[in-house]
Image (cartoon, grey):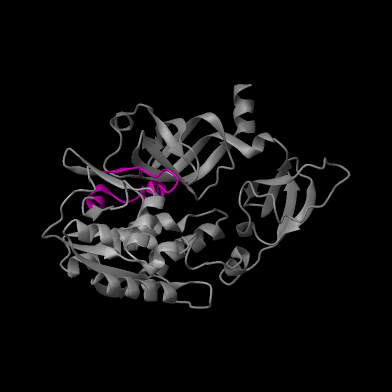
Amino acid sequence: MQQSGHSFKGKRVILGLSGGVDSAVAAILMKRQGADVQALHMTNWEDDDGYCTAADDLQDARNVCEQLGITLHHVNFAREYRQRVFSNFLDEYRAGRTPNPDVLCNREIKFGEFLKYAKRLDGDLIATGHYARRVDIDGRAALFKARDRSKDQSYFLHAVNSDALGATVFPLGELLKSEVREIARDSNLAVHDKKDSTGICFIGERPFRKFLEAFLPANPGPIRTAEGLEIGAHQGLMYYTLGQRQGLGIGGRQDATDGPWYVVAKDIAENALVVAQGEHPLRYSMVLQAIQPSWIDSMPAELATGQRYDCSAKIRYRQRDQPCSIAIAGDSSISVTFENRQIAVSPGQFVVFYSGERCLGGAVIDRTVSLEDTMRKTG
């Protein structure tokens, strides 16, 4: 297991320097541990229209490197990002799903193209400012949650394989965010109080619908209740997420209660947005089907032998671990059954599996079995 006192003397470490406080402190810590640190700043999005902070981040990275006395390299992965991440992002929205491009960005860019480029710079290892821990077990790298649970990013790293993790250092894995900022302040880094980046760089702070409209044309259709009554119109299924209650444009109705309406389903065939009020069973599910499973090292032995595997899972980043069991459902498909009902499970998002603090891998949520369907089958 990586410890803060580990020595990297004689090792060239290529550190991903974003221009934020986390990666800057990661550079400080690697230098303290004797590494020959060189920084690599990536440009993954080139449309500078005032929303993405890429230019400011590059300047902040330059300032950090000048202050710490380390070499800064700059590489443009915008073409690779569009081909391997953004194209999938658009395809998923066209299909009425809700993708998470950060997972693909980590696998394809930050621990894919970045790692290959680092080797061209004669790097022995790469390092990042992610909040996660790498633990070596029987000679293989495993991914564990960070000490700071509120910042843990293992959910977004679940698709990075053991080989890539084996070439990676996570200097912040054992630190709290408050400790990271304290190190930055004590080191007189100008970015010590820089606001954490949120969301996806290519969207920035702009309205999400406005961004999508530039790439996906509006496709209006009806809004229907779960019982089939048409009560409004939508501008495109891609503009809505399951569980959404704001921006539906459904006013008070004499044939309904005053309670809020929620998006509970998308009928792709009919181009209809399905909504319901209150604690409707369509809002919940206990079973989901997932595709394209990705295991950090190898599939759990129980699954490989056709048995169910008990573990825990998250269906969204901020969620607490949920007890569940996994079973093989077909080629490249698994079934996940939860002990407790889950709300607003969204196809296109990732279900990520854990055994205690260890992240095992994950899969893309393909479809769900609503609580209503489960009740009908068991009733």
Asked if residue 160 is among those painted magenta in the image, a careful observer would answer yes
Measured along the vertical axis of the image, is residue 76 above or below residue 326? Answer: below
Residue 244, percent from left and from top? 65, 50
Residue 253 left/right relative to 132: right
Q: Nearer the viewer, residue 14 or 355?
A: 14
At 52% across and 67% down in the image, what residue appears?
204
- Against 188, residue 97 (above or below) is above
Residue 363 visible (yes or no)? yes
Let me know if residue 346 is in the magenta part.
no
The quadrant in which residue 190 appears is bottom left
Among the 4 quarters of the image, the one containing residue 335: top left
- Location of the N terminus by quadrant is top left
Point out the residue furthest to the right here. 254
Position of the C terminus, as image quadrant, is top right
- Left or right of residue 216: residue 35: left
Say which of 204 and 58 sits in front: 58
Magenta stretch, residue numbers: 142-165
